[in-house]
Image (cartoon, rainbow, N blue to C red):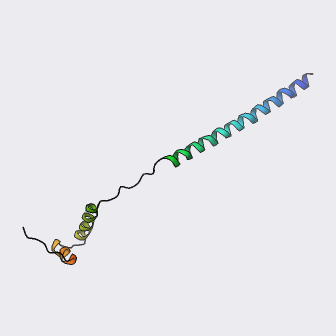
Amino acid sequence: MDRILKDIVAADKEARKRVQKKKTECLNIQHLVEAKKAEILAPKKRKPRKTKKQKLEAILKQAQKAGLKPEEIAERLGVTLEND
């Protein structure tokens, strides 16, 4: 009788270990799924668009870094500068 009882207790312990292991695995999967969901639903961080004015200023800065003078830039663009 003792032997049967010990076998039942041992089987019960094994079953509890298997259930606990599966529970842990399910929780891990749940956390992964929740993280993936948050990543998908979160808005992507986008770089703000430059306005037309900002683009022109960036082009002028590059031209000045290349060593062009304002008169040379205007000449290449075919624009005349007004002298103030």
Between 30 and 14, the residue placed more toward the observer is 30
Query: Can you give x and y, in whole percent of width and height, for residue 57 in the image?
Result: 24, 63
Q: Quadrant of residue 7?
A: top right
Between 1 and 49, the residue placed more toward the observer is 49
The correct choice, above or below, for 48 with respect to 13 in the image is below
Q: Is residue 26 left or right of residue 62?
A: right
The correct choice, above or below, for 72 with respect to 15 in the image is below
Query: Can you give x and y, in whole percent of width and height, for residue 15 in the image?
Result: 79, 33
Query: What is the quadrant of the N terminus in the image?
Result: top right
- In this rendering, the count of numbered labels is 0
Query: What is the quadrant of the C terminus in the image?
Result: bottom left
Query: Can you give x and y, in whole percent of width and height, for residue 47 in the image?
Result: 38, 56
Query: Can you give x and y, in whole percent of width and height, for residue 10 in the image?
Result: 83, 29
Question: What residue lies at 67% left-to-right and 39% top-to-bottom?
Answer: 26
Q: Is residue 45 left or right of residue 5?
A: left
Q: Quadrant of residue 59?
A: bottom left
| Residue at the far right in the pictured view | 1
Question: What residue lies at 27% left-to-right and 64% top-to-bottom?
Answer: 58
The correct choice, above or below, for 32 with respect to 81 in the image is above
The correct choice, above or below, for 38 with respect to 54 in the image is above
Q: Is residue 36 left or right of residue 69?
A: right
| Residue at the far top in the pictured view | 1
| Residue at the far left in the pictured view | 84
Q: Quadrant of residue 30?
A: top right
